[in-house]
Image (tube, grey):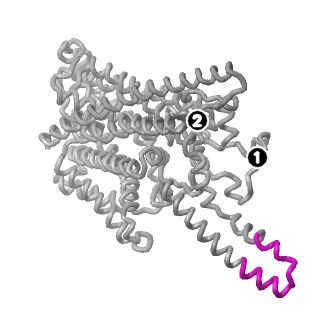
Amino acid sequence: ALHAMKSAHGRRGEELPLLSSTEISSDDVDVFSAASSADTIRIGNKNEQQAHPLKRPTAAATNGTAPTNDDNNTNSEHHHHGTGTVLETALNSAKTCLGTGTLALPYAASQGGYLFNVLGLILISLWNLWSVNRLIHCGELVRELYGAQIQNHQHQQHPQGHHARHESRTSRHRRTGSSMRKLFRGMITDANIIDDEVQWSEENVLAEHHCPPEGTSTYGRVAWYALGPIGLHIMDVALLVLLLGVVVAYEDAIISFVSLTPVTTGSAALDSLATVLIIAPLTCVEDLHFLSKTSALGIFIIFISFAVIFASGLIENRLSGIWDVSWDDMWPNSLTGACNWFGVTVFGFGAVPITFNLMESMQDPRGMPRATEIALWIVGCTYAIIGNGIGILFKPSVPEFKSDVLQELPDSSWIPTMIRVSMSLVLTITAPILLVPCAEIIEGKLRMVDLEHKPQYRILIRFGMCFFCASVAFIIPSFVHIISFIGAFCVVLTSFVFPPLLHLALLRKKMSETEGVRLFKRSDKELGRFAKKQDETERYWRRTLQVDAVLLLLGTILSLLASVVTFLDLIRAS
């Protein structure tokens, strides 16, 4: 770690300003390289070892050997990253954003106005890019502030060498007679083993108190080190509400899609119950990898859906909608319309919460800012074409969209029917992938229940969550209003509020740690040069704190305002 810090920060004794997103080396991104040897991703109730640069056990810890201090030994300093390139990471990020929420983009453009929609997409894209860079900086600050603590925690998880100390303590008694030596050595060894085990147990308890729990995501670890356990709990609650809200939106979409097809039961309640009977058992399956392969199918169905929608609009209205657009259609007609646009649009940008996941999949994590920039350009342009294009194309027949775009397709044609059935199938298969992390968050909080030996409680939790989501979807049958509220509340918190908040907390810790620290040089000239650089660093940090504070305040105000307005509109729609 010291070798990486020297190579990243220049000569000994110098300190540079906080690294920009383009100056981070692959070693600097290794924030949690010694965080945990058993860090896992939970997929389908099954722990799988996650190989990525941010949380990786060192070879020394794994093999039980002492690390070498040879700076020329590049193998000891090498970090294994993923295999993704910048373009592949950008496409993965774009595919994550281009999901079912795109069906509500014409509604958002109609509510917010077409010119306002384009300008807003540009601003939200830039805001997402800024938040991603802030999270990258948070990772660098955690490495600088808590690198030694994280490494000590990993060593305490692998105490292979503590028994070797027992033999060294008794080696000085080897001159005693053989019988007495064996007896004396046995007594001393047993006492030393007990002392060492007690000492190691106490150190382990202290480390567990100062380190996040095992299995915590990288985003959660950053929240832990920035704000303590309360930060991780807040993050868990926000992600829980976000994922449950997305599942409720999926249930709403399934019910509305199926109601216009021959496969409906004729009752919204029975359709909702049928989805529960399909989704709930899938959440209890041991391995859900086969479901995750349907993402490509979902993207293909969405692409076909919009192709059919554009073709239907051209056949029905041709290009007459262009001449029907007035100046009033360029801007929001009310505060409710602007907040609904904001919620739906923010919901469609999911680049910030998955920043660390995408970095961990890259061959060179230094390209993450560039990959995010490419992805946001793709997503922003696509959203502008879908929202404004369909809104203007259907303007003569649909003056204002009130729901998702599939509701505007004809009911009698077999092509729209196949699209609705296909979308319902994809959403039904995708919902369990989102519900399993929700269930694991709740199960992690229920420490008093032994879920490992009582699986019936785990099944009860997952079936209960499915019934809860289906009930909310039945009571509030409005897909666009739900994702608007979830976007304004949860997505804004995880994308625009948490990044500056975490960065503020970590940067203030960094400043307090380096406050008053000065290194004495050999000459006054060198001392003056160092003091000047130190002042530049402190000015840069103060400017960064000011920007973080302004954007944190802006994100908090927008989240509160949009959440209240969209929630009231959601209640009226129900």
Q: Which residues are magenta?
A: 169-188
Q: Quadrant of the N terminus?
A: top right
Q: Where is residue 15 shown, x and y percent of the image?
A: 61, 29
Name the residue furthest front.
524
Q: Residue at x 19, y 51 (%)?
A: 474
Residue indicated by mark 1: 69
Residue 183 belongs to the span the image colors magenta: yes
Mark 2 surroundings: few (<14), some (14-19) or many (≥20) residues within 10 A: many
- Quadrant in the picture for residue 202: bottom right
Q: In terms of image quadrants, where is residue 193?
A: bottom right
Q: Residue at (36%, 64%) from the top-left corner?
A: 446
* Gap between marks 1 and 2 measured at Cα: 25 Å
Amino acid, disc 2: Pro
Residue 191 in the image, given as x and y percentages of width and height = 67, 77
Q: Is the residue marked by circle 1 packed among few (<14), some (14-19), or many (20+) residues within 10 Å?
A: few
**Helix, strand or loop at mark 2:** helix
Along the viewing direction, whichever of 517 and 181 lies nearer the viewer: 517
- Label 1 is placed on what type of residue? Asn
Furthest-left residue in this view: 572
